[in-house]
Amino acid sequence: MRDVLGGALFLAVGGFALFAGSDLSLGSLDVPGPGWLPLGAAALIAALGAVLMIRGLASLRAARTTKQARETSPVDVRALGRIGVVVALISGFIVIMPIVGYLAASVCLMVILMLIASPPEARVRAAAIGLIIALVAYGLFVVALQVPLPQGTLWGA
Amino acid sequence: MEGLLGGFVTVLQPYNFFFCFVGALVGTLIGVLPGLGPTAAIAMLLPLTVGLDPVAAIITIAGIYYGASYGGSTTAILVNIPGEAQSVVTCIDGYRMAENGRAGAAIGIAAIGSFVAGTIGALGIGLLSLPLIDIAIRFGPPEYFALMLLGFVVLLVLAKGSPVKSLIMIASGLLLSTIGQDTVTGSSRYTFDIPSLIDGIGIVVIAMGVFGFGEVLFNLEQRHQRSVQAVPVGGLLPTRLELRRSTGPIVRGSILGFLIGLLPGGGATLASFVSYALEKRLAQDPSRFGKGAIEGVAGPEAANNAGAAGSFIPLLALGLPGNPVTAILLGALILYGFAPGPLMIQQNPQLFWSIVASMYVGNVMLLVLNLPLVGVWVRLLRVPYRILYAPLILFMIVGTYSVSNGVFDIWLLLAFGLVGFVLYKLEFDPAPMILAFVLGNPLELNFRQSLMMSRGSWDFLLERPVASAILLVALGVALLPALGPIRRRLSQARLVNEL
């Protein structure tokens, strides 16, 4: 099943790359143009993706007829949900950081990340740890290492 | 050898020495964290070194590399989780030793083995680089093209998992490397009108995303309990018998590892696997392997250190990375304005010898400072992941932003983190992709330059003996799997790879 998904994914990736790069010229055999490597690689990816997918489907069918044990572990929806939440939070951080500045954004991010991962009884402690992490990081990156991080347009930077 | 002495003088200056120390310490810290190894550590800490003087920066990175390797093996022994591919083999017998109460000895022998190997490796680099550079000076685009092709072939033949998947990964890396403006014709490839993409994607972002952030996402999905083995205080020295048993593996591992590191596509990981297989074959009682045989830790740990040293030679002398770590180092050197290759050593001998000397100094530092710090690392490992993951994420975000001074790369970090996660779940190995990504541009450039030099005729392949010889070797390696008896050996080697 993994192979079917993987193969399909790369078939799609290769196909998309072929489409997006269709305006690149392949050049000639003597003078290769900008398109030969990306389009060649994309074609290879798509072809191999198809091969992988077909092999995966074949082994799925074989497994079904011989009643072999399932090779994949069941998909943990809650786990994927955790990942989705973290990705969403980081996306939010990226969007608001230029506006409210790095300090405020990182405090929010750290506190929320700590909160969602902590058991209910340790919520306050988790939020406190998040705040401390953000402050220490600010001291380390902005003050000590002088990394130029956005101050935030909201505060008139 | 006076160059090497000069290198030591540079490294031992207080400013550089301090940063080597910091690099080793922080590198060990990151390497200790489960799932993060030298590649992720360098990717994550590289942005912070940008403000430093280039020589100090590279010395710091060398310290980070060794620190992270050491940290990774500590985690492998104590928690049975490899920091990176090169620590996988250490898990096998190292964790068993820990379960038998010999964790201290395992960590100790890993440190000693790495130190010996690092010394031999540094000597090897000192001895081999100059002759190699003399040869490499005469290399032109056709030879480089042939060498890179050889690297790809070796990568493909020895890669984990099915060749189809490895080839997909290599092709994907090549595809990603084309993003940006084509240097030869100036046309934009896959930039989708995003200005940040005109220069292409940075190696740091990809490596940090796939190995660092992807690992974090992977850990978020799992929720395994980590049981950290207790290390007896003061038990860090192996017994005399253990030392005697380890001498052979360490020496063999060092030499073998160094040679493997020299190969394109070789490096620390392959060296550790081969050493394990060799020691098991050579042992008087192979059944002890897998149950806590110290040879199974001493050999591979020495080999992976020597393999790393060996892999620096193609990087520094030819500008050719053979594995993800050297790929990032190449990116780092370019970031600082150096172009690794035969000319770099002529123009910047101080840099080259400082790097070599810093490897040795870094090894000494680790031996001296980390043995007493094991207790600190153990306590760090006991911190629950739900607390660790937040600062890790912030660290990576800041690191990415500071390299590019823009927000777009953080989106890329996120995207590649998801890519890394999906690749792990679908059982694709990302290492060939990273390597292909780094080599894609030089490969294409050298190919096109070769054709331009020969005015469009493909005869350039035949007219240059060195290039043709290398290509023949590549062809031979590519055809190896087809031969029956070799096929069996190869599948054995692949099985070892899949441990």
Image (spheres, coloured by chain):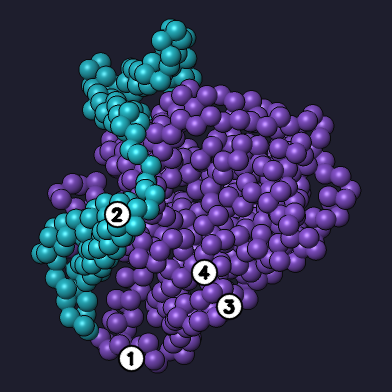
Chain letter corresponding to the colour cyan: A
Q: Would you say residue B185 is visible in this rendering?
A: no
Residue drawn where x is 56% and y is 31% of the image: B226
Which residue does the numbered mark 4 point to in the structure image?
B491
Q: For mark 3, does the 10 Å Cα neighbourhood hold few (<14), some (14 to 19), or many (20 or more) residues? A: few
Which badge, 3 or 4, comes first in the chain's sequence?
3
- The quarter of the picture where residue B127 lies is bottom right
- The residue marked by circle 4 belongs to what chain? B
Q: For the residues marked 1 and 4, what is the alpha-carbon distance in whole angstroms?
A: 36 Å
Which badge, 1 or 4, comes first in the chain's sequence?
1
The reply to whether dot 4 and dot 2 touch (C-beta < 8 Å) is no
Mark 2 residue type = Arg
- The residue marked by circle 2 belongs to what chain? A
Q: What secondary structure is found at the residue carrying circle 3?
A: helix
Mark 2 and mark 1 on one chain = no
Q: For the residues marked 2 and 3, what is the alpha-carbon distance in whole angstroms?
A: 61 Å
Mark 3 residue type = Asp
Which badge, 3 or 1, comes first in the chain's sequence?
3
